[in-house]
Image (cartoon, grey):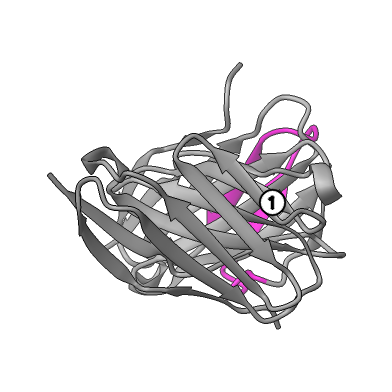
Amino acid sequence: GAGVSQSPSNKVTEKGKDVELRCDPISGHTALYWYRQSLGQGLEFLIYFQGNSAPDKSGLPSDRFSAERTGGSVSTLTIQRTQQEDSAVYLCASSLSQGVRGTQYFGPGTRLLVL
Amino acid sequence: KQEVTQIPAALSVPEGENLVLNCSFTDSAIYNLQWFRQDPGKGLTSLLLIQSSQREQTSGRLNASLDKSSGRSTLYIAASQPGDSATYLCAVTAQGGSEKLVFGKGTKLTVNP
């Protein structure tokens, strides 16, 4: 079956512009996570969705970052007024459930470069 | 706050060697621990998942162990091959809340032919 997909795979933008990153989770997966992988920083949690609600946004680095999820499926991560430090790989993961059954499956990521 | 540390940061070995990658975590309240592989420019591939009640998991030439009380895990790779060259990431799933993954910074493995 289809895995987690993300688009675009690569995005180059100018400082100050807004960008939208998209994640299509595995069908039926209720939990969705966004992570960011920066050079030298490792993988960091950004936000978690259960259905369409986001009970944990604790990893969003600033109010320029927001995310939404519609229909319990597709999610978009929006970065407003991008800065060079936003350059990173943004990874999305989904899982069928939480707890001991909640293996997270990752998409290929979106590589964002802010010039 | 949960912190995950991986040692060493990089490792270079000749083909055929057996090797061990180490992972430690500060909070033992975890659901499970996963080892991932990441190839350059690619996403994450899950290798092994060990539930908190388990001691080890095996898949082919890979064996992962978990000692929750001491906050340690090891990934053992037998008879290494050049195709094993990648970055290996360890992550724990914290109990409660969002159950987000907390990752180590990885070990970059190079297996030389």
Quarter-of-image position of residue B26: bottom right
Q: Give the residue displayed 64% in from the left and 46% down from the top.
A: B57
Image side of residue B6 versus residue B111, left or right: right
Instruction: Determine the residue positioned at 36% across, 50% down.
Output: A111
Q: Which residues are magenta?
A: A59-78
Q: Quadrant of the N terminus of chain A?
A: top right
Question: Image point 76% across, 33% down: which residue?
Answer: A29
- Above or below: residue A8 compared with residue B7: above
Q: Which residue is at the front of the view, B53 or A42? A: B53
Return the x and y of residue B98 as percentages of the image width and height. 80, 60
Q: Give whichever of B49, B81 is nearer the camera.
A: B81
Residue A98, position as x, y percentages in the image:
83, 48
* Residue at disc 1, secondary structure: strand
Q: Is residue A13 left or right of residue B36?
A: left
Tell me: A110 left or right of B71.
left
> Around disc 1, counting alpha carbons within 10 Å, would you say few (fewer than 14), some (14 to 19), or many (20 or more)?
many
Judge whether B63 appears above or below A8 on screen.
Answer: below
Q: For residue B12, which quarter of the picture?
A: bottom left
Q: Nearer the viewer, residue A76 or B53?
A: B53
Pointer 1 chain:
B
State whether residue A98 appears in this view.
no
Q: Residue furthest top?
A: A1
- Mark 1: amino acid: Ile
- Is residue A65 located in the magenta-colored stretch of the structure? yes
Query: Where is mark 1, residue-wise?
Result: B50
The residue most toward the left is B113
